[in-house]
């Protein structure tokens, strides 16, 4: 037998073993890297959540949204990190690159929609009014990257951040408990501004 006839099966075995190792040990979505887990796992890229929080110069913790929509003059600082890549195969290095790019941007505050959500919930569940009344009106401030070219962001205060924390979660369904929980794929990655 010639070795070339054995090469394709060997390549497939190597790809399968690498994909299984990365999916079980490295955070790779089982749906990617060969896709051998797509029929046996719900841990696809769309069932992963990237949570980004920051600390302002005043020491206040804020939630950051749309962090991949950086102004065009800051996008090169991402060094190839994209939302899709972070969902498919998150690494500490990607989180550090994202965090450093975020720390080089200014941010503006947006309405988190919390009040509207509470109002809709009460309309659907009138008996929940006492519970909603006890909830904070605004649990945390929400910021997005500032881009002076966007008309709705041209005025108002901008904020600098001194620290960014990034956590990538996967959604895990527990049939026994009948609930979905968030399980971190990496330890939180925290980047502080260099002084």
Image (tube, helix red, strand yellow):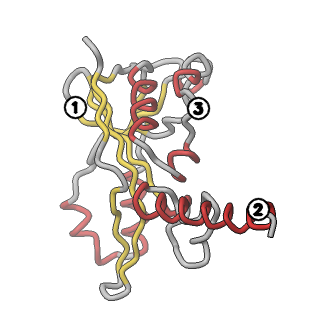
Which mark's residue is nearer the viewer, 3 or 2?
2
Label 1 – label 2 distance at C-alpha: 64 Å
Picture coordinates of residue 124 (x, y %)? 43, 74
Circle 2 Cα neighbour tier, 10 Å, few/some/many (<14 / 14–19 / ≥20): few
Quarter the C terminus occupies: top left
**Residue 102 seen from this side:** yes
Q: Secondary structure at mark 2?
A: helix
Number of the label disc, if any, that sits on residue 3: 2
| Picture quarter with the N terminus | bottom right
Rendering coords of residue 141 (x, y %): 32, 38
Query: Which of 122 and 89 lies nearest the eye of the viewer?
Result: 89
Q: Tell me which label, 1 or 2, sits earlier in the chain.
A: 2
Residues under numbered marks 1 and 3 in contact, where contact means CB atoms less than 8 Å apart? no
Which numbered disc, 1 or 2, marks the residue closer to the eye? 2
Q: Which residue is mark 1?
A: 60
**Above or below, 103 relative to 120:** above
Q: Residue furthest bottom?
A: 176
Characterize the local packing of mark 1: few (<14), some (14-19) or many (20 or more) Cα atoms within 10 angstroms: few
Secondary-structure class at tag 3? loop
Number of the front mark, 1 or 3: 3
Residue found at the far top of this picture: 195
> Residue 80's mark?
3
Instruction: Where is residue 72? Give x, y as percent.
Output: 62, 21
Distance CA(mark 1)–CA(mark 3): 30 Å
Residue 128 versus residue 66 in the image, above or below: below
Label 3 to label 2: alpha-carbon separation: 38 Å
Count of numbered circles on the image:
3
Residue at image point 68% right, 61% down: 11
Q: Secondary structure at mark 1?
A: loop
């Amino acid at each position: 037998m010639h070795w070339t006839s054995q090469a394709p099966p060997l390549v497939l075995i190597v790809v399968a073993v690498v994909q299984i190792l990365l999916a079980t040990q490295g955070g790779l979505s089982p749906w990617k890297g060969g896709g051998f887990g797509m029929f046996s796992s719900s841990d696809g890229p769309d069932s992963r959540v990237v949570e980004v929080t920051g600390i302002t110069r005043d020491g206040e913790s804020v939630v950051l949204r749309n962090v991949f929509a950086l102004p065009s003059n800051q996008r090169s600082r991402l060094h190839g990190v994209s939302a899709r890549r972070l969902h498919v195969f998150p690494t500490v290095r990607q989180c550090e690159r994202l965090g450093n790019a975020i720390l080089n941007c200014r941010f503006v505050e947006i309405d988190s929609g919390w009040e509207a959500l509470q109002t809709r919930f009460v309309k659907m569940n009138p008996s929940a009014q006492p519970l909603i009344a006890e909830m904070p009106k605004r649990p945390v401030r929400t910021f997005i990257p500032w881009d002076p070219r966007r008309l709705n962001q041209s005025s108002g205060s901008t904020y600098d951040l001194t620290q960014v924390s990034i956590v990538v979660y996967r959604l895990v369904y527990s049939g026994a408990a009948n609930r979905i929980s968030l399980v971190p794929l990496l330890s939180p990655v925290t980047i502080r501004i260099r002084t």
